[in-house]
Amino acid sequence: MDTLLPPACLACDTPVPEDGLFCLACFRTAHFITAPYCLQCGVPLPAGGQRRCDVCTAGNPGFTTARAALFYDAMAQNLILPFKYGDRTEAAGGLARLMRRPGALMLAKADVLVPVPLHPSRLRARRYNQAALLAKALSRLSGRRCVPDALQRLRPTAPLARMGLAARQAEMQGAIAARPGFAPMGAYVLLIDDVMTSGTTANACAAALRAAGAARVDVLTAARVADPRFE
Ligand SMILES: [Zn+2]
Ligand SMILES: [Zn+2]
């Protein structure tokens, strides 16, 4: 494909030396998540403060830890929205490279990579599951096994973006289950998604994976909404 599509910056179309890189201008504006962040869910926290965010302190999430590469700011949206909705599937490889650093420990230890599922009706409309593309790209980079259809959406769910936390939880209740036959008994499962917001979807997926036998579920996403208190 390189002869047809020379490598371009992940966030704009400037040519770059190899796939999966930002051009210099975009690299300067890219907002990578660095410490301090919540040791559990990975949300950025103010310097010198608590080690876990208020949400994790109030009640353990269903997953063990979560990490992400980028803040979900305007620059990350430029990168992720075309990947998610605009058929820019070639961004998966580059995003996976960005996820490799925050996810290094997870990728070294996980038994299996599992993407957050789309409902079949949405998959038909969009033609691909962006989380599955990321999981497959991370599988190629890490050598970890990927099971793209391990989880299923049992019913379509409304977009969670404008809902409060209680409404999100109600919307996701019972919406996700492990596919019959997927039984990761005692396994360490790494859940993959493009963006983590409140963690409600990740929690629902983690609960389904644990119900199927997973011993540990971690979450690795390309981007993370910065403030958990926006709810
Ligand atoms: Zn660029
Ligand atoms: Zn947290």
Image: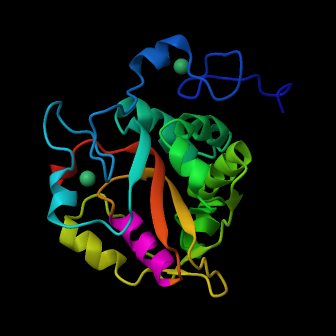
In this rendering, position of residue 149 left or right of residue 160: right
Coordinates of residue 36 in the picture (x, y in percent): 26, 34
Location of residue 184 with respect to 39 vertically, above or below: below
In this rendering, position of residue 171 left or right of residue 2: left
Residue drawn at the location 21% of the way across and 66% of the way down: 165
Residue drawn at the location 33% of the way across and 66% of the way down: 200
Q: Quadrant of the N terminus?
A: top right
Q: Is residue 201 magenta?
A: yes
The residue lying toward the viewer, choosing from 211 and 188, is 188
Coordinates of residue 211 in the picture (x, y in percent): 47, 83
Coordinates of residue 121 in the picture (x, y in percent): 57, 74
The residue lying toward the viewer, choosing from 103 and 90, is 103
The residue lying toward the viewer, choosing from 44 and 10, is 44
Location of residue 40 with respect to 225 vertically, above or below: below
Decide if residue 85 is in sight here. Answer: no
Q: Which residues are magenta?
A: 200-211
Location of residue 185 with respect to 21 vertically, above or below: below
Q: Quadrant of the C terminus?
A: bottom left
Decide if residue 129 is in sight here. Answer: yes
Residue drawn at the location 86% of the way across and 25% of the way down: 3
Quadrant hosting residue 19:
top right
- Magenta: main secondary structure equals helix
Q: How many marks?
A: 0
Q: Residue furthest bottom?
A: 180
Location of residue 78 with respect to 203 vertically, above or below: above
Q: Is residue 183 magenta?
A: no
Q: Residue furthest top?
A: 24
The residue lying toward the viewer, choosing from 81 and 142, is 142
Residue drawn at the location 83% of the way across and 28% of the way down: 4
Coordinates of residue 41 in the picture (x, y in percent): 32, 53
Q: How is the image coloured?
A: rainbow
